[in-house]
Image (cartoon, helix red, strand yellow):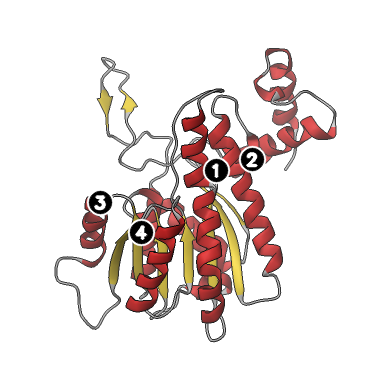
Amino acid sequence: MSGAAAAFAPGSTALITGGASGVGLAVAKLCHAKGMNVLLADRNAAGLETARREIAGEAADASGPRVATSVADVSRAEDWAALKDSALATFGSVEFLALNAGVGGQGTWGDGDYFRRILETNLFGVIHGVNTFLPVVQDAAKTKRTAIVITGSKQGITNPPGNAAYNASKSAVKTLAEHLSWDLRATTTSVHLLVPGWTFTGMTLTISQTGGGQTKEKPAGAWAPEQVADFLYKKLEKNEFYVICPDNDVSEETDKKRMLWTVGDVVHGRPPLTRWRDEWKQEAEKTMSETKI
């Protein structure tokens, strides 16, 4: 193991929020495969038990890495305090912290519950997590390589219209991760922003093109969560902060062109979100197609 991936050391402990399914579960499997102890945190108690069995099996080897679970709502500071007590009592340290839990949802202006629910989970879930576990991770860093991974979203970078609360929460998460990376730049704790592309979690339902029904089959354009976890590990080997995952429909080059166009709204004095404005769409598409990366 090289670079920040050295945090995936046998005997070290990974704490992963939102670990009962999707990307969180895939990262947990990767950690366990590397010989790490794993503590999964999630609001879904039944999902946690299923995930534990999936990772460790019904009869885990007592001499091998351990898998534990903790039911926790990341929006609640008191749940974080209990999670810290559980982590230290069970494993004694945390070397890899993945703040992955998040929620989506639809709403609009005037819907206070929509904004509050998403921001309390996606934004304050990260704030609580860093405030609670940063001292624990830094203590572990006295003797081992440690890392913190925070899950963001492309919507927090390119900001497509239609979900203001979610986009705002993930934009704020990006800023927090960048500041945390700067503040820890002289330590042996690295910080990384994980930005999945289109990822099929198994809970995603897509409309069938044959009859309008719903199916749980993975769309061809989506990545599996395990691909995201593998991509994360490779980027950590290179000590990269921004882990912007492509998928089978959108390449890394396309993502970069979209991000460049988005920041161009500010640089060139255009209105916001021009990529989606009818009067700018043609120029945006032409410029992105001609941009060299």
Q: Amino acid at mark 4?
A: Ala
Q: Are marks 2 and 1 in contact (CB under 8 Å)?
A: yes
Q: Front-most of 293 and 83?
A: 83
Q: Which of the two discs, 1 and 3, sits closer to the camera?
A: 3
* Distance from the alpha carbon under mark 2 to that under mark 1: 7 Å
Whether residue 231 sits left or right of residue 258 in the image: it is: left
* Horizontal relation, residue 56 to residue 78: left or right: left
Which mark sits nearer the N-terminus, 2 or 3? 3
Picture layout, residue 289 above or below residue 201: above
Mark 1 surroundings within 10 Å by alpha-carbon count, few (fewer than 14), some (14 through 19), many (20 or more)? many
Residue 1 in sight here: no
Residue 47, disc: 3
Tag 3: amino acid: Gly
Mark 4 vs mark 2: which is more N-terminal?
4
Rounded to the nearest angstrom, the CA distance separating label 4 from label 2 is 27 Å
289 over 35 or under it: above or below = above
Dots 3 and 4: beta carbons under 8 Å?
Answer: no
Say what secondary structure mark 1 lies in: loop
Label 4 CA crowd tier, 10 Å (few <14, some 14–19, many 20+) = many
- Assess disc 3: are there few (<14), some (14-19) or many (≥20) residues with their C-alpha within 10 Å of its C-alpha: some
The residue at the far front in this view is 78
Q: Dot 4 corresponds to which residue? A: 41
The C terminus is located in which quarter?
top right
> Mark 2 = which residue?
157
Q: Residue at x 54, y 80 (%)?
A: 139
User: What is the spatial separation of the Cα atoms under label 2 and label 3, in whole angstroms?
Assistant: 30 Å
Compared across the picture, whether 74 is left or right of 216 comes to right
